């Protein structure tokens, strides 16, 4: 943003605050004096705007298509229909059929085609209408994309992103509700990212497209329409995020480690514990499953001495199980004052009936019960 636009933005915020005397001074001062005046009066320039997760993903893809002519999007209904969830809205009109490629309903076919294109130096973004359908293409993802760099002695890279909605939505039953974070997170050669907010979506997707390794990018259907504030920095075409965890809410009494939509539930649970019991819960948004930022978790446990993992996967062999195993094998174990607890999805195929579906996954009340149990409050 230019200095003039920054000045205009700052003065518009001042007007909204009805601080007329400061506004008058701001108009009379030059840029440097205006900034000094703002700092002197303790007024912070507004530097955020709101954006849905859907729009964050759309803008990230568009900017990477603009940045690199080797990037293209391929998948079912990504072009003429603007994507099943409208994440690719407007991209066909802007970039044309060479860059935005509609395919038949054949995941193994278009995924294999995209992996081949990546092996020849192009940079595909493959959209799965649901990651449940990626099972049709798992050989291409796991055996071709993930392993070729290693098997070629480091001479053949495969720069590709596999993205789309993952996990449960509402009323889509067992075959369309599975969370594949643990599945893909177990594969050497893949990176697995799990964005929560709009800023996560923009920064992590742009980083994934630029990553020379194959990246599995697991989104959540129920977050697409959610609106989050994004910083001015995050709106830059050069903005990317590292594959590290983020502390969404600091605390000193207990650590909640979670990802995607369960970050929202964990934050609500932390708010309940603060208001009703004065318990300060630290909420960590993983953002990346592989690599796993275990150092951030250990650092938090050293402060809080208690840990709960929250996920919507099945309990056996899940992300939480891996976090607990790694923590127990580290110096973090010595700082625990109570056993670690997991909050997971139910160990059943996801029910179709809404009442049963609601029981099958974590919610704030379930997380609150786990917190109280870990802290021996009930």
Image (spheres, helix red, strand yellow):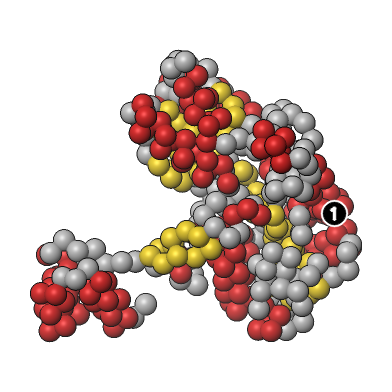
Query: Could you say where residue 28 lies in the image, as x and y percent from the top left?
Result: 12, 84
Q: Residue at x 41, y 67 (%)?
A: 49
Q: Nearer the viewer, residue 302 or 88?
A: 88
SS label for mark 1: helix
Which image quarter: residue 39? bottom left
Q: Nearer the viewer, residue 39 or 11?
A: 11
Which image quarter: residue 72? bottom right
* Tally of numbered tags: 1
Which image quarter: residue 29? bottom left
Left or right of 237, for residue 182: right
Residue 220 appearing in the image:
yes
Left or right of 144, for residue 346: left
Query: Could you say where residue 170 lies in the image, as x and y percent from the top left?
Result: 70, 48
Left or right of 170, for residue 277: left
The residue at which mark 1 appears reads as 137
Query: Could you say where residue 253 lies in the image, as x and y percent from the top left?
Result: 38, 27
Q: Residue at x 19, y 64 (%)?
A: 43
Q: Nearer the viewer, residue 54 or 213?
A: 54
Q: Is residue 268 above or below residue 89?
A: above
Q: Is residue 102 above or below residue 367?
A: below
Left or right of 152, for residue 300: left
Q: Which quadrant of the rendered structure holds the N terminus?
A: bottom left
């Amino acid at each position: 943003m230019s200095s003039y636009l920054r000045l205009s933005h700052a003065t518009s915020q001042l007007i909204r605050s009805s601080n007329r005397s400061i506004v008058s001074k701001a108009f009379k001062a030059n840029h440097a004096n205006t900034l000094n005046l703002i700092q002197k009066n303790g007024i912070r320039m507004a530097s955020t705007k709101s954006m849905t997760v859907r729009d964050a993903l759309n803008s990230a893809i568009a900017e990477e298509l603009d940045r690199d002519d080797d990037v293209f999007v391929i998948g079912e209904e990504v072009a003429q229909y603007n994507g099943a969830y409208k994440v690719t809205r407007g991209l066909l009109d802007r970039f044309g059929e060479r860059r935005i490629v509609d395919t038949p309903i054949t995941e193994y076919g278009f995924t294999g085609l995209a992996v081949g294109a990546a092996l020849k130096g192009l940079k595909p973004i493959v959209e799965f209408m649901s990651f449940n359908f990626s099972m049709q293409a798992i050989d291409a993802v796991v055996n071709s994309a993930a392993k070729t760099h290693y098997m070629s002695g480091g001479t053949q890279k495969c720069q590709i992103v596999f993205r789309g909605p993952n996990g449960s939505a509402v009323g889509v039953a067992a075959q369309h509700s599975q969370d594949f974070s643990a599945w893909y997170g177990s594969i050497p050669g893949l990176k697995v990212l799990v964005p929560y907010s709009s800023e996560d979506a923009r920064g992590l997707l742009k980083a994934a497209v630029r990553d020379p390794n194959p990246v599995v990018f697991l989104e959540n259907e129920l977050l697409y329409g959610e609106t989050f504030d994004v910083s001015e920095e995050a709106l830059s075409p050069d903005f990317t995020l590292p594959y590290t965890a983020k502390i969404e809410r600091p605390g000193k009494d207990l650590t909640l480690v979670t990802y995607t939509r369960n970050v929202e539930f964990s934050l609500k649970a932390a708010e309940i514990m603060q208001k009703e019991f004065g318990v300060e819960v630290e909420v960590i948004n993983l953002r990346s499953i592989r690599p796993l930022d275990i150092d951030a978790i250990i650092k938090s446990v050293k402060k809080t001495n208690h840990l709960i993992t929250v996920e919507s996967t099945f309990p056996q062999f899940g992300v939480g199980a891996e976090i607990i195993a790694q923590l127990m094998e580290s110096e973090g174990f010595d700082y625990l004052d109570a056993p670690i607890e997991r909050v997971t999805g139910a160990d059943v195929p996801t029910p179709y009936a809404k009442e049963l579906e609601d029981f099958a996954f974590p919610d704030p009340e379930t997380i609150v019960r786990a917190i109280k149990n870990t802290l021996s409050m009930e």
